[in-house]
Image (cartoon, rainbow, N blue to C red):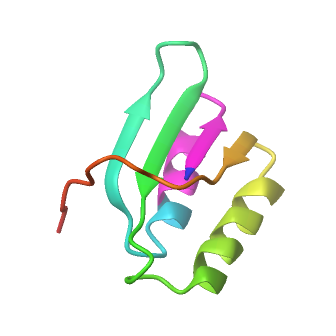
């Protein structure tokens, strides 16, 4: 899941809170373009699709969020605990 949002601490905390509602792995942040991009990977086996769909819907409703992308991840995911 890739989230583009305003580059401020409140938006960052709200997005991370929602992303961590499921078992997010390999969370990455980038603010080099003036907007904050947060990416999180999920294993399908760890999370029900309805949970990820709810997170996506909640993110889309946030006024601080510019866009949300959900796509298959074909790269190696680092384990984080």
Q: Residue at x 66, y 84 (%)?
A: 50
- What percent of the width, then of the height, locates residue 36? 55, 29
Q: Over which residues does the magenta segment extend? A: 2-16
Apparent side of residue 54 relative to residue 25 in the rendered image (left or right)? right
User: In the image, what residue occupies the spot 69% across and 73% down?
Assistant: 53
Q: Position of residue 75 (x, y in %)?
A: 33, 46
Q: Quadrant of the C terminus?
A: bottom left
Residue 4 lies, with reference to residue 63, above or below; the image says above
Front residue of this view, candidates 78 and 60: 78
Count of residue discs: 0
Q: Residue furthest front?
A: 74
> Horizontal placement of 30 versus 35: left or right?
left
Give the answer, above or below, for where 5 lies relative to 50.
Answer: above
In the rendered image, residue 13 lying in the magenta stretch gets the answer yes
Residue under the image location 54 percent in, 87 percent down:
48
Residue visible at 61% across and 44% down in the picture: 3
Q: Position of residue 11 (x, y in %)?
A: 60, 43
């Amino acid at each position: 899941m890739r989230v583009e949002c305003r580059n401020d601490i409140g938006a960052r905390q709200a997005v991370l809170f929602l992303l961590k509602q499921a078992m997010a792995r390999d969370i990455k942040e980038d603010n080099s373009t003036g907007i904050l991009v947060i990416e999180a990977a999920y294993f399908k086996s760890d999370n029900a699709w309805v949970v990820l769909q709810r997170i996506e819907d909640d993110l889309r409703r946030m006024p601080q969020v510019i866009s949300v992308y959900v796509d298959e991840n074909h790269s190696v995911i680092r384990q984080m605990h």
